[in-house]
């Protein structure tokens, strides 16, 4: 007999979108919430200074064993699987999408419109910023619209970045500081950022990580969190399209199956594991997997590519004043009418390219003793900067996550394979897009002075999403505008898998805003919390 | 130091050839101790003694010894986004590094008579250059350095202290220092004679 765990809401996955849904639902609704996570709890906050030191000393993964050994995939994916998920590692950069992102077909004739617009998601952007604690200062309102201030004052720009802002704005392009999920004042039990500059492990807890939320919810008795429990399939009730249970394996007792029963199931496993679970959950009535009558589960995988340049700038900079401090411009995310579609963000950081110490000079001679320092110093009179633009890639229907017949985990489940593909219009415009971005970089350098040292295109798709895209038409989408699957009324998918296109900037805030919006709809099933 | 030089030379040649292709001892390797005298002689030759002073060199070498001893071979490395690969670091570099120190000493004796530690700094640098000829000298993760001199220099030059010395400013890179000072130009480093750009 399986061990049965019952709740009103079962959230599959323990990352940042799960934390958002669990926190909102538990605060507003009277519902028993069970969160089930395949990986382990993270290193406690008290241990993070030591982990940070070993990261700096030896490059060790500060989140050791933050993955399930053979739960992997081919293609662009990240292995983090544990409480907090990738948002333990993340940099905490949280720009919003712009209104254009939601209306690509209407405005530019490419891709698809989302089934909601910026106005509908805007309150949830604000809510996500407040829940995770975001510091920021808005850019010009015509480029960076928002209805309320950020929850916290902005992170101060570093001396280097202030110089770079002055330099870059000679081009006429406005830049401002990136919003970040990091504290600048005491906030929600967290101390202000200490500028340690190792944000992939923040030793002080200034950066938001979902384990804070889960810890608080567990302490208050608001949720149950099952760790090291891998959900392997969802099963429908006999003769019904409603999901009745999730079948799981307890990694510590693999011979004793676990069954999770709930009124509502919420998949919060990100762009890899949520569509994967739906595909794994096929049955005689749904041979292609759950929520997949349209055949769209795993399709329209999306993200953005980037072009970057390293440039020499006509000023001295001091590397390491605050390496995480960076500039953002949305000038080209909101381009107005276009002859050919190209949209991208713009970011600037300090860089040490060409300015690092070295032991061999340009003539190949070995440098030792005082000459190493002298050589380094001689190359440090002028600073360097990194410019990067994420550009929107319209996904092809065949940009897909599929089950890989040649890859199984230890429980015999097929694992995913991800193959990203540009839609024809994006493929056609790729050269134009990348040439345009190089032109913007050259324009900035011409205006501010300096020279471009190198440019390169990173061929990966960053901040991926999709695989369960949202839409009003069940024939072309997997979930509706609230994240409810078209095929199963008590099954929701939240966050990254539901996005229609990847936008031009880091996606996590948008994934969280969408998840909070889904939580409103999920919550309608349950009475309001009275105590 | 080993008494049987023939045996030692054989061992060090093996270690050096492994180092040349980036190899290190595996996790099961015998724990090796870096000869303290030779390591200090190396530090005095390859570190910026003119800037650090002798006390500074001693501090840097001691830090290097503690750092090398604290290495846990083949650690899981930090993994970024977008790749399913879990990477692991190299084995313990100390056996190869210890052998290279011994080789420096042997070569010093064969070429000059006195041991490595008894030579003047320029002669020591000359021997180090001979060993590094054609080697990969980085930059890279110092724990993966194929030569002890590269490891020592790599460890020092990635430090907060080295950056401050280079720029003559108290930048404090990678120290947790609060955000209030971030917009300010870093203060001049006490005693620094680093000229301002264009000066």
Image (cartoon, rainbow, N blue to C red):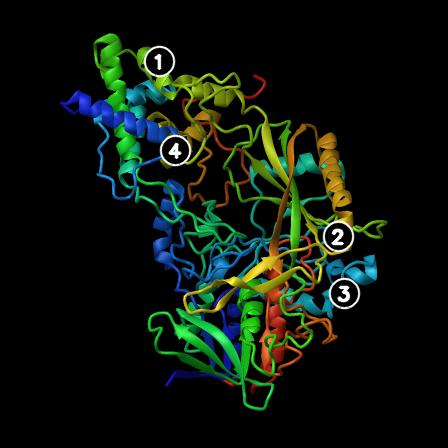
Q: Secondary structure at mark 1?
A: helix
Q: CA distance from mark 2 to mark 3?
A: 16 Å
Q: Which mark is residue A215?
A: none
Answer whether labels 2 and 3 touch (C-beta < 8 Å): no
Whether residue A443 sits left or right of residue A53 in the image: it is right
Q: CA distance from mark 4 to mark 1?
A: 23 Å
Q: CA distance from mark 4 to mark 3?
A: 52 Å
Q: Dot 4 surroundings within 10 Å: few (below 14), some, or many (20 or more)?
A: some
Which chain does the numbered disc 1 sit on?
B
Whether residue A70 sits left or right of residue A422 in the image: it is left
Q: Position of residue B179 (x, y in %)?
A: 50, 45
Q: Secondary structure at mark 4?
A: loop
Indicate whether B84 appears above or below B183.
below
Disc 4 target residue = B22
Disc 2 target residue = A426
Q: Are marks 4 and 3 on the same chain?
A: no
Does label 2 or label 3 sit earlier along the sequence?
3
Q: Secondary structure at mark 2?
A: helix
Q: Are marks 2 and 3 on the same chain?
A: yes
Disc 1 target residue = B126
Please identify, in this view, whether the residue under mark 2 or under mark 4 is nearer the observer: 4
Disc 3 target residue = A113
């Amino acid at each position: 007999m399986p061990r049965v765990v019952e709740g009103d809401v079962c959230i599959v996955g323990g990352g940042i979108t799960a934390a958002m849904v669990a926190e909102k639902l538990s605060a507003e609704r009277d519902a028993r919430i069970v969160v089930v996570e395949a990986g382990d709890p993270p290193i406690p906050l008290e241990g993070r200074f030591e982990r940070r030191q070993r990261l700096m000393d030896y490059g060790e993964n500060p989140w050791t064993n933050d993955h399930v050994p053979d739960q992997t995939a081919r293609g662009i994916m990240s292995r983090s699987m544990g409480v907090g998920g990738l948002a333990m590692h993340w940099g905490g950069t949280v720009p919003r999408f712009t209104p254009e992102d939601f209306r690509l077909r209407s405005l530019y004739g490419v891709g698809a419109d989302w089934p909601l617009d910026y106005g509908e998601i805007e309150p949830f952007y604000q809510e996500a910023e407040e829940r995770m604690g975001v510091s920021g200062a808005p850019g010009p309102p015509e480029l960076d619209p928002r209805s309320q201030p950020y929850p916290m004052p902005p992170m101060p720009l570093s001396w280097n970045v202030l110089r770079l802002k002055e330099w870059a704005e000679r081009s006429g392009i406005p830049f401002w500081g990136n919003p970040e999920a990091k504290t600048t004042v005491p906030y929600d039990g967290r101390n202000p950022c200490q500028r340690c500059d190792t944000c992939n492990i923040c030793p002080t807890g200034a950066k938001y990580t979902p384990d804070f939320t889960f810890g608080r919810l567990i302490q208050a008795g608001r949720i149950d969190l099952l760790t090291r429990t891998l959900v392997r399939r969802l099963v429908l009730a006999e003769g019904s399209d409603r999901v009745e249970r999730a079948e799981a394996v307890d990694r510590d007792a693999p011979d004793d199956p676990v069954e999770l029963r709930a009124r509502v199931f919420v998949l919060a496993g990100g762009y890899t594991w949520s569509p994967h679970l739906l595909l794994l959950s096929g049955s005689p009535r749904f041979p292609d997997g759950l929520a997949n009558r349209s055949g769209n589960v795993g399709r329209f995988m999306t993200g953005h590519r980037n072009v970057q340049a390293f440039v020499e700038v006509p000023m001295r900079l001091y590397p390491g004043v605050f390496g995480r401090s960076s500039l953002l411009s949305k000038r080209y995310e909101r381009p107005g009418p276009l002859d050919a579609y190209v949209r991208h963000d713009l970011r600037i950081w300090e860089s040490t390219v060409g300015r690092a110490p070295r032991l061999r000079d340009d003539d190949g001679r070995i440098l030792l003793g005082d000459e190493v320092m002298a050589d380094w110093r001689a190359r440090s009179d002028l600073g360097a900067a990194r410019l990067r633009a994420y550009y929107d890639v319209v996904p092809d229907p065949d940009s897909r996550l599929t089950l890989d017949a040649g890859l199984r985990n230890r429980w015999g489940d097929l694992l995913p394979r991800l193959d990203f593909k540009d839609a024809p219009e994006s493929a056609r415009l790729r050269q134009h897009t990348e040439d345009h971005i190089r032109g913007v970089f050259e324009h900035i350098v011409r205006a501010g002075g300096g020279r471009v040292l190198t440019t390169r295109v990173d061929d990966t798709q960053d901040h991926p999403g999709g695989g369960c895209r949202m839409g009003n038409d069940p024939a072309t989408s997997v979930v509706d505008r609230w994240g409810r699957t078209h095929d199963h009324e008590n099954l929701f998918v939240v966050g990254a898998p539901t996005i229609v296109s990847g936008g031009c900037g880091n996606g996590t805030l948008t994934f969280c805003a969408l998840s909070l919006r889904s939580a409103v709809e999920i919550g309608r099933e349950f009475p309001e919390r009275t105590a | 130091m080993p008494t049987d030089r023939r045996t030692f030379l054989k061992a060090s040649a093996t270690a050096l050839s492994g180092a040349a292709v980036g190899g290190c001892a595996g996790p099961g390797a015998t724990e090796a101790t870096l000869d303290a005298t030779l390591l200090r002689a190396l530090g005095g030759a390859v570190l910026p003694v003119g800037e650090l002073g002798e006390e500074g060199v001693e501090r840097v070498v001691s830090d290097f010894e503690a750092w090398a001893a604290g290495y846990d071979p083949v650690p899981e490395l930090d993994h970024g986004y977008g790749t399913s690969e879990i990477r692991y670091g190299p084995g313990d570099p100390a056996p190869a590094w210890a052998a290279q120190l011994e080789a420096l000493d042997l070569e010093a004796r064969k070429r000059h008579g006195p041991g490595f530690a008894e030579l003047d700094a320029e002669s020591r640098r000359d021997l180090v250059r001979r060993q590094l000829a054609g080697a990969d000298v980085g930059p890279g993760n110092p724990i993966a350095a194929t030569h002890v001199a590269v490891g020592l220099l790599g460890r020092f030059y990635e430090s907060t202290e080295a950056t401050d010395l280079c720029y003559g400013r108290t930048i404090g890179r990678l120290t947790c220092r609060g955000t209030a000072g971030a917009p300010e130009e870093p203060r001049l480093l006490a005693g620094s004679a680093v000229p301002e750009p264009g000066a």
